[in-house]
Image (cartoon, rainbow, N blue to C red):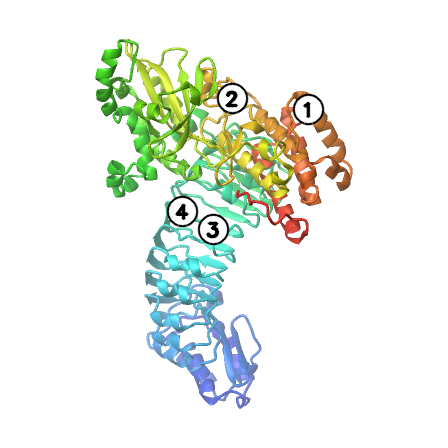
Amino acid sequence: MANPVPIHTYLLLLSAFIHCVHLSNQLQPSQFNALREIQQFLNYPSLLSIFNTTWDFCNIEPSPLLTVLCYGDDVTQLRVTGNNGGNPPLLPQNVSIDVLFSSISSLPNLKVLSLVSVGLWGPLPATIGKLPALEILDLRSNYINGFIPLELSYLNNLQTLVLDHNKFTGQIPDWISSFNDLAVLSLRNNSLFGSLPSSISSLESLRVLAMADNHLNGEVPNLRNLTNLQVLDLKNNHFGPNFPVLNPRVITVEIRNNSFQSSVPNEELSSYFQLQKLDISINTFIGPFSPSLFALPSIDYIDISGNKLTGKLLHNTSCNAHLVFVNLSSNLLTGDLPECLQRRNIEKRVVSYGGNCLSDEEQDQHPSSFCHGEALAVKVMPQKLQHREDEAMGVVGSSLAGGIAGLMVITGLGYWVFYKRKRSAAMKGPSTRLITEKLSTVNTVKLLSDARYISETMKMGANLPTYRAFALEELKEATDNFTHSIIMAEGPLCQIYRGKLADGTAVAIRCLKMRRKHSPASLTHHIEMISKLRHKHLVSCIGHCFECCSDDSSVGIIYLVFEYLSYGTLRSSISEGIAGQRLNWAQRITAAIGIAKGIQFLHTGIIPGVFSNNLKITDVLFDHNFHVKICSYNLPLVAENGGMVRSSNVRVRAKDEDKDDIHDFGVILLEILVGRPIVSRNDVMVVKDILQVSNKMDDTARRSIVDPTIIKECSAESLKTVMEICLRCLSDDPTDRPSIDDVLWTLQFAAQLQDPWRLDSHHINQQSVSLPS
């Protein structure tokens, strides 16, 4: 029989064996015989004529092809690599994997077994379970098939399991979680199917989870508790639809070519300060992409190509200097390619961005209208609708069905109100009536196309009620028939009422009297945008109601229903509160981060973005969990009708319009730092000048101007970082102001600088209330 394996692969093995003759007394006879049998299985009969003596296996010089280590008279490590680690030919038919592992099982104290590229074929034998001391099992690049045997679970000390590049089939067994010390689980390039068992989330020692190139599907289990996980490699499977939940310490995330169809958790990813490689390409991710990821402190590889990610890139976005590979191709990105990605003097950096709607046309781009249209045309997943059909028809409370119902209500859910109101309207005369017949003209196909977007955005809405249409009777009941005594604010065409819905939910209801006539259909675009403005750091709208005129069926009054917060403003906890009840430094940074996240969502979380929001510290409120929320921002419908916000057309963004909000945020940061109200432009100028002078001096000078409440609570580095970003935000030239992504990243970095100092400091106030992010 011809030798299918290159002879030189095993000649080193044989020569090593022959080199140490007649020295086997230190090894137990049973183990010596086992090794000799193993050597015979891994060599072919034509080579056996070389064996004319005995060998001392324990004194073989380790090499890349063979390592045998002993402790006392026991073999503890056996590593054999054939064919230089590549794909080997099959071992001959007369070589039985069962007999081979039967011989291996005679090494009861074996801790490391590595048989790589040696041509093993057939199912993995049950005798693998007879190696109780085994800590590392590496059987890469063979032809082992069948299910992963139950007997493998007997290896209670296993720390590394590598079965890559074989032909294993079946599902990953639940008992995989029985390996309490497992650090590496790698099953790449097999034929495994089914879902990942949820029990994997209990493997607290796991550092590498590699399941690439299989047929696995379903949701990835929650891996947040795996604090040691560094590498997640799930590429080329069918996982989805939601982005995996991971611990921020992860270093490599590879989930390309799967079935993910959710939004990307930009907020979480922005805190992954050890992340070096992010590959989410060739999926169907939707929603905004945050350019702040370019500046993560450890990032060097980003691939988001082949998705439906949206957002506006800015020319002055920052990048990590070590970023060597960026692929933004085939998404729905608009704006300018960041200057840091255009630098030609950075050697070996690869940047691909074709197939978007960017202004830089060096690589092929679509017109901006294409990206806008495609972003609005994201369809609901048919399979998800099918699985939840009954819920969508009967349970409005589910996130997807509720999102759809909240939009479809415009086309039919109000009929019962119409019939209930019909007689009353006739008695009152022709002044106003609630009308629904005309609402059928609304583009319901368009509304349904955005239902999935709203469902995904709900995840950022922190348990907000599902957006829906309200009946006028509901709002009258909630406000005691809009009694004047519960008006919170009032303008010529807008009143804000405090109310309580039938389920006890406290709400604030904006009553907008339309300046000019609108048909319900013409308001569809505004309602769509308002319904998408849902984020845990925004006071969000949870529904609306149209009241139409009886003479021409135009909308006369629109009611917008917002969540109601009664836990005070940020100013009340910064500069107006009693000293002992003011926020400490860590809480102030957390509040600033929350505001920045809210602004980031307004700018990049929807298309088109919402700018010129006239932000004030008195418009930042606390919810019951002490999350900060921006309560006043540039709602298109409110601005157009003279509501109590700055009037501007959000559909057309002026140059550097986002920098207005950055300056406003700088003013808020200023008050957070000094702890006294900043109420005029003169206040801003004076305090800014003092801040600039102090920041150029030493730590003592910087601390001399901050709120006395926090002087002893903040680390020097954290305080200086916040001061510097505050001054940049207040730059007179808008082009010198940072992007909101840069602001957010800097504040998160300042929080990181504060944490170690806080743990070591004896000045921390142990009684202060924690402020969640």
For the residues bearing labels 2 and 4, Cβ distance under 8 angstroms: no
Query: What's the CA distance linking mark 2 and mark 1?
Result: 29 Å
Residue 202 visible in the picture: yes
Depth check: give the residue in front, 451 or 467: 467
Rounded to the nearest whole Å, what is the CA distance between mark 2 and mark 3?
Answer: 36 Å
Q: Residue at x 37, y 19 (%)?
A: 558
Q: Earlier in the sequence, mark 2 or mark 3?
A: 3
| Residue nearer the viewer, 283 or 573 | 573
Classify mark 1: helix, strand or loop.
helix
**Residue 719 image point, x, y percent:** 68, 40
Q: Earlier in the sequence, mark 2 or mark 1?
A: 2
Mark 4 residue crowding within 10 angstroms, few (<14) / some (14–19) / many (20+): many
Q: Separation of disc 1 and disc 3 at Cα?
A: 44 Å
- The tag earlier along the polypeptide, 1 or 4, is 4
Residue in the picture at 56% in, 26% down: 615
* Disc on the earlier residue, 2 or 4: 4
Viewer-nearest of labels 2 and 1? 1
- According to the picture, the residue beneath numbered tag 1 turns out to be 683
In the image, residue 434 above or below residue 267 = above
The answer to which quarter of the image holds residue 336 is top right
Residue drawn at 44 percent across, 84 percent down: 49
Question: Which residue is identified by label 3?
Answer: 246
Q: Which residue is mark 4?
A: 257
The label nearer to you, 1 versus 4, is 1
Q: Badge 2 is on which residue?
A: 653
